[in-house]
Amino acid sequence: MPDLYAVFGNPIAHSKSPAIHAAFAALTAQDLHYEARLAPVDGFATAISEFVAAGGKGANVTVPFKEDAFRLSTRLSERAARAGAVNTLQFAGGEIFGDNTDGAGLVRDITHNLGCSLAGKHILLLGAGGAARGVIAPLLAGGPASLFIANRSADKALALAAAFADLAAVGTGSFGETVGKSFDLVINATSASLAGASLPLPAGIFAPGCLAYDMMYGKGETPFLAQARAQGAARLADGLGMLAEQAAEAFFVWRGVRPETASVLAELRAGLAA
Ligand code: NDP
């Protein structure tokens, strides 16, 4: 019997994770089965215990269960404890190990796939929700010159920076408080693009050579990337690479081998364009 893995979410039918992990398993010759499982919004813990009883070895966790998974974990990685959320679970010896690979996935996409080092860069992070929280420590670990968090509700950005104050002094404010500043890397971690909304970004925030990165992805250019292009950002990237890289990092946690992502990413890209 192949080892059993699954992604839990609600909704989950849209998830690309089963296809990504099937491709990784083929690339690395790992004998595993990975499926999508719909859990009731108030039934995550029960769904996980049934999965473990059925022999499940590990799971990915997506919206809206990342905080439930955090609470359910009996042991956390340091990056999951920092993120306050878990997207990767491993079950062994009665223990539920919780990890968070989102930040590592983002950083690997930016540094490895896109060839943009974080060292010495001025970074602007837009948004102060769960996705933003998960990437702050990995971004700071890259040694940027500065990190500024801008959010619609500026108080949430301030609270987020306070939670990481032991790592670095992080600037915060509303979008308007970025006036007069410019950045080498601007990352959109808001969900504004989901609603098709544009952000009130002042002119001049994209420094020459700036990479604009949207954690969101979809068919065609996202609203944030269209806005960044219009405001002069030199390079644009969506979050499809982050999706592939957070999956590769989870695969590494479970199996101890790191799949290459280039061919999987190319297939995902072709699937989006179709
Ligand atoms: P949350 O609901 O936790 O946070 C949403 C954030 O977006 C808040 O900062 C909120 O501001 C802001 N926001 C929402 N609407 C607007 C708007 N119209 N104008 C300005 N700001 C707005 O969401 P998550 O952090 O979980 O997710 C954010 C995004 O990241 C999603 O698009 C998600 O798909 C993406 N993501 C991508 C991943 C990948 O692998 N590529 C992985 C994880 C997430 P306020 O605080 O003021 O409400």
Image: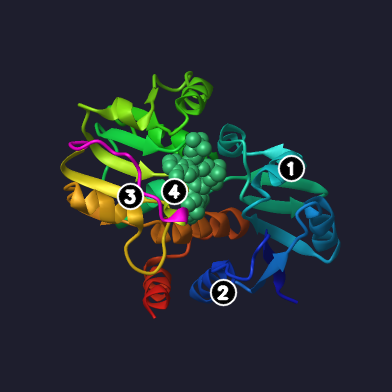
- Residue at 38%, 28% in the rendered image: 174
**Residue closer to the observer: 12 or 3:** 12
Q: Disc 4, ligand 1: is the CB inside 8 Å?
A: yes
Labels 4, 1: front one: 4
User: Which amino acid, by three-letter code, is at mark 4?
Assistant: Ala
Disc 1 crowd, CA 10 A, few/some/many (<14, 14-19, 20+):
some
Relative to 12, does residue 225 appear above or below in the rendering?
A: above
Q: Earlier in the sequence, mark 1 or mark 2?
A: 2
- Residue at 57%, 32% in the rendered image: 82
Residue interval drawn in magenta: 195-205
Name the residue that disc number 3 marks: 213
- Residue at 68%, 65% in the rendered image: 6
- Quarter of the image for the N terminus: give it: bottom right
Label 1 to label 3: alpha-carbon separation: 31 Å
Name the residue that disc number 1 marks: 73
Determine whether the residue tagged by mark 4 lies in a helix, strand or loop. helix
Cβ–Cβ under 8 Å for marks 4 and 2: no
Residue 22, by quadrant, is: bottom right
Q: Earlier in the sequence, mark 4 or mark 2?
A: 2
Relative horizontal placement of residue 264, taking residue 56 as reference (left or right): left
Q: Position of residue 262 (x, y in %)?
A: 37, 68
Give residue 192's mark: 4
